[in-house]
Amino acid sequence: MFKRVGEESELLTCPYNVSHQILRSRFQVHLVRCRKSYPNSEVVVCPFNITHRVNKQEIDWHVSNCPNRQSFEVFKSNESQVQGLTSSMGSTFNDDTNTTYETANETFELETSQNWDNLPRVPSYNPRAYAEKANILRLPVGMQPSQRAAFREAERKRLQNL
């Protein structure tokens, strides 16, 4: 069933400007845009949920009472059970990279099993190189008339050779 726009569950208050009332479905987009309008605000991001923005003075309390902390703790305990398993080739799934989050009272270490620095090097995608090899029609955009004529002739030859 459809919810009415005025219902409390649909509207959220912006942490940067309390006069902003945003639909829940648009809240993340609004946070990014509104943060640019208030660059000197003392609002920090919760380490457990990116949509949680709290004042710098309240971050210690929020981190200890965040409702998403429980799901992180469950994930962390499940991940520790998976670590140490070996694959059929004998390698161990144990690439620990840790992120440290410090508050005034405590230091939290967020453990993950992913390390993007260890991934193999892959060349970036070059659309021009792909288009030169593919059977597609390219258009001479932004060229002078003599360049367009030369480009069209080169395209005819290229497409005939494919």
Image: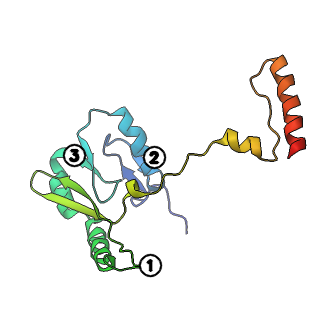
Q: Which mark is residue 29?
A: 2
> Which residue type does callout 1 highlight?
Met
Q: Position of residue 100 (x, y in %)?
A: 21, 55
Residue in front for this viewpoint, 55 or 11: 55
> Mark 3 = which residue?
55
Image quarter of residue 77 = bottom left
Q: Give the residue at x 39% y 45%.
A: 31
> Which residue type does callout 2 highlight?
Val
Q: Position of residue 91 (x, y in %)?
A: 39, 74
Q: Is residue 4 above or below residue 133?
A: below
- How far is the residue under mark 1 from the one under mark 2? 44 Å
SS label for mark 1: loop
> Which residue type does callout 3 highlight?
Asn
CB contact under 8 Å: marks 1 and 2? no
Q: Residues within 10 Å of mark 2 (few under 14, many from 20)?
A: few
Q: Quadrant of the N terminus?
A: bottom right
Q: Is residue 147 above or below residue 6?
A: above
Q: Give the residue at x 39% y 39%.
A: 34
Of badges 1 and 2, the one in the foreground is 1
Q: Is residue 153 above or below residue 14?
A: above
Left or right: residue 76 versus residue 133 is left
Q: Which mark is residue 89?
A: 1
- How far is the residue under mark 3 from the one under mark 2? 20 Å
Mark 1 vs 2, N-terminal side: 2
Q: Position of residue 112 (x, y in %)?
A: 31, 64
Image quarter of residue 149 = top right
Left or right: residue 145 versus residue 20 is right
- How far is the residue under mark 3 from the one under mark 1? 49 Å
SS label for mark 2: helix
Q: Residues within 10 Å of mark 1 (few under 14, many from 20)?
A: few
Left or right: residue 75 versus residue 157 is left
Mark 3 vs 1, N-terminal side: 3
